[in-house]
Every structure is written in C-alpha cells, then in structure tokens.
Image (cartoon, helix red, strand yellow):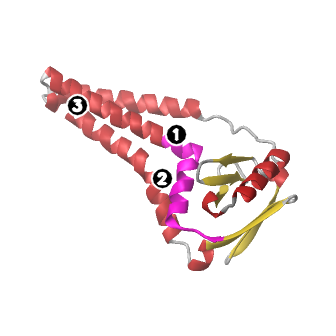
Amino acid sequence: MEVTIEFELLDGDITNSVKAFPQIKKLRFFGMVALGLAAMTLLAGAVNGELASGLATVITMTVFGGVFFTIPYFSARSALQNFTPEERRLTMRLEEGGVHVTSGKGESSSPWDAVHRVVESQDVFLIYTTEQCAHFLPKRLLSPENTETIRNLVASKVEPRKAPSKMKYVIIVWLALVMMFALISALTAQNGG
C-alpha cells in the first residue's frame, strides 16, 4: 500500500487544517465563552439600568474572546504567506515504512511507530509526528481509493498516543481571568464607573 501526492499549499488548505487541530478548537471554545460572558454582562447591565458599570468588563471580555477566536487563523495565514513558492510545493508519500514529506527546501521522514496519531476531518488528514506538530494532507487532492488506502495504513500502522491533558491548567487560568474581570468590574462599579 502506498499513496504519493504532489501538491501546492493553498490558503484554503491552511484554513481547513487550522480548523481540524484540537488545540485550536479549544481556543475557539474559550473565545466563544468569553464572547458569551461579555454579552451576558452587557445584557445584565442593560436590565439593571447600570450599563456603564459593566462596560469595562464587556470590552475586556470581547477583546479577549475575539483574540482567542481569531488569532489562530491569522497566524496560520501569515505563516503561509511567508512560504516561498518552492516551500508551498510538497510531495507526501505514505507507505508501509512511514510518512515521507519533501518540499523544495528539504525533506522529512517518520516511521509509523514515531507517528503519535492521525486525525481525519472533513477536509484534511493531520499526521502528528510529535504531540504538537503535524503534517497535513488536504483531502481535496485524494481520490476515494487513496483516502481508503490512507485510512487502512493508519489503522494498521499507527497506535494512537493520548496527549497528556493540560485542561486543568487551562481551566485554572480561565477561572483566574474570569475572577480578575469580575473584580475589575466590581471596582469600576464601586468607583462610579
């Protein structure tokens, strides 16, 4: 079994790949929570007739949520814009021995036992060679037969490793930030807005 794909990275490939990364999904979730909290604070202030007292919190939470929600996309797009044309042209070969990626600037090979996991989304295969780094293969390039061959290779060769959870740290930081915003809001309200 072998699949070899030659392709050029497009802006859409980066966007679709960013959407598939679990870490990005978590950032977007927290961004949505921040935006939701901002909306709830704004609504509560409007209902209580104290709109100005919560305005600092609303602005802070909106900025915070907007940053978490949008930064991954902007950073991914700027990374692609920094690629030279030869870095955008890739050849990816998936075979019995592992994953081989070649660009105009170099090459990378990973045997299957070094692959941490493979994530498949609607638009892309993410092939993790470490806990945080992945090669991505846009599915727009694949025939149904190639897609099935890749799935079979992955099923037979990759033993997924569970990434150590850092969620408790994220929750602690998130709660600390929410409490900080609540304190700022209370102090702003106490001092007359």
Question: Residue 184's x, y, as percent?
Answer: 28, 31
For label 3, the SS is helix
Image point (72%, 55%), residue name: 147
Question: Residue 172's x, y, as percent?
Answer: 50, 29
Q: What stretch is highlighted in magenta?
A: 7-27
Image point (44%, 28%), residue name: 175
Nearest the eye: 63 or 192: 63
Q: What residue type is labelled 1?
A: Lys
| Mark earlier in primary sequence (3, 1) | 1
Residue 144 visible? The answer is yes
Disc 2 packing (10 Å; few <14; some 14–19; many ≥20) = some
- For the residues labelled 2 and 1, the Cα–Cα distance comes to 11 Å
Image point (69%, 60%), residue name: 143
- For the residues labelled 2 and 3, the Cα–Cα distance comes to 26 Å
Disc 1 packing (10 Å; few <14; some 14–19; many ≥20) = some
Q: Residue 26 carries which label?
A: 1
| Mark earlier in primary sequence (2, 3) | 3
Counting labels gives 3
Question: Residue 101's x, y, as percent?
Answer: 73, 67
- For the residues labelled 3 and 1, the Cα–Cα distance comes to 24 Å
For label 1, the SS is helix
Q: Which mark is residue 42?
A: 3
**107 relative to 125, above or below:** below
**32 relative to 71, above or below:** above
Q: In which quarter of the image is residue 190?
A: top left
**Horizontal side of residue 53 vs 24, given as left or right:** left
The residue tagged 2 is 72
The reply to whether discs 2 and 1 touch (Cβ–Cβ < 8 Å) is no
| Mark earlier in primary sequence (2, 1) | 1
Residue 187 visible? The answer is no
